[in-house]
Image (tube, rainbow, N blue to C red):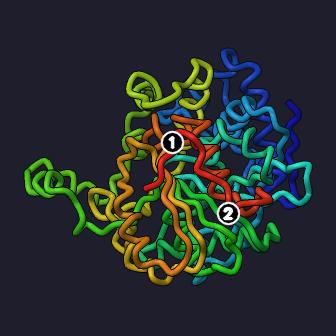
Amino acid sequence: MSLIRRWRKSSAEIVMAEELRTAAAATATATGAATAAETTVDSNGRKKWTWPSLLRWIPTSTDHIIASEKRLLSLVKTPFVVEQVNIGSGPPGSKIRWFRSASDESRFINTVTFDNKDENSPTIVMVHGYGASQGFFFRNFDALARRFRVIAIDQLGWGGSSRPDFTCKSTEETEAWFIDSFEAWRKAKNLDNFILLGHSFGGYVAAKYALKHPEHVQHLILVGPAGVSADTDMSERLTQFRSTWKGAVLNHLWESNFTPQKLVRGLGPWGPNLVHKYTSARFGSYGTGELLSEEESKLLTDYMYHTLAAKGSGELCLKYIFSFGAFARKPLLHCASEWKVPTTFIYGYHDWMSYQGAQEARKHMKVPCEIIRVPEAGHFVFIDNVSGFHSAVFHACRRFLSSDPDNESLPEGLTSA
């Protein structure tokens, strides 16, 4: 498969290119190089020595993220471009949220683009969820790229994007961190109109972005979105659990911003094994749909570990956006009447995000809204039931893809809620 990396001629991107070459060399000589001293290059072009992987408590680095992404995307047959999109820089103390750190370096959004041969194909932008990165859509790129120009990003502070110090102290600042950095990315990419798809927390961000910038979003697709309902809608079982000592301890950890990523880092060299157990269980023995192959599982586990174990940044949004139990502090339900973009919700039958919240939100919307449920799928519907997910997306976008969208019936196997 041909892989092209487009780099702008800035010092930061020269650094990334150097990191890619280093990662490739490290991959080619994995066993022998593991015990050798490693070097990286800072933004001024100076080499600095770092501990070799086997001697580090947390065996990851920027090199590892880039290399693991490249290995995972090697499963994709469609040619694509990976680029680090510059969203600007600002001095320390800047009012722009993602510049609040000791550094005035430019920030970058890791972006993967699959250009469709048909210049008239609609553009779809895909935004990952919490604890994930754009590579999680690896099973979908080929099918979607046949009908769309597909662009997938790592949100600021995640995956291969810049990981600035996270200094937000409120829900409003935290939402602005993601919404405004996405808008800066949109401007840098010179995108005007596009279909916006977000999964889980990425669905929350996509919806909030569409509320603020509806003029750029042609259609909104929310896949198992987080943050639709408020904590007043929590189940009796969760309410009872929160009143126990175990619930109190977990609630304290939540409010202390103890993230799953901190656990992975804290386990040091045992972190990869924890991630392996999770992916094997979630997409293997406890999977609800099409299981991952051995190669897919291995590459996704490796990619997931390195993106989770890297420097904490965007992950620290957790307590500001959600209360314990993953209920939004500013739920989408409360602003449903302000919706200006036609919307499709997609849920797996076994998604722990309840589609009833979307049904309640739809009652208050003044724009077209549909809810599609996909069988044999859980929260990661795009991994669990690939063909069902693709059918749901194509149906959601029928007015852009079909010459007679009004007569398009819901594909067999999917249900409307």
Pinpoint residue 378: horizontal percent, then vertical percent.
43, 40
**10 Å crowding of disc 2: few (<14), some (14-19), many (20+):** few
**10 Å crowding of disc 1: few (<14), some (14-19), many (20+):** many
The residue lying at 74 percent from left, 72 percent from top is: 88
Question: CB of mark 2 within 8 Å of CB of mark 1?
Answer: no
Q: Residue furthest front?
A: 407
| Residue for badge 2 | 406
Is residue 101 visible in the rendered image? The answer is: no
Pinpoint residue 387: horizontal percent, then vertical percent.
62, 36
User: Between 317 and 411, which is closer to the camera in this rendering?
Assistant: 411
The residue lying at 73 percent from left, 52 percent from top is: 42
User: Between 273 and 288, which is closer to the camera in this rendering?
Assistant: 288
Query: How many numbered marks have been drawn onto this rendered protein structure?
Result: 2
Q: Secondary structure at mark 1?
A: helix
Q: Secondary structure at mark 2?
A: helix
**On the rendered image, what quadrant is the N terminus found in?**
top right
Type of the residue with mark 1:
Val
Pinpoint residue 319: horizontal percent, then vertical percent.
35, 64
In-image side of 302 versus 149 (left or right): left
User: Between 214 and 407, which is closer to the camera in this rendering?
Assistant: 407
The residue lying at 52 percent from left, 79 percent from top is: 339
| Residue for badge 1 | 381
Q: CA distance from mark 2 to mark 1?
A: 26 Å
Pinpoint residue 25: horizontal percent, then vertical percent.
78, 27
**On the rendered image, what quadrant is the C terminus found in?**
bottom left
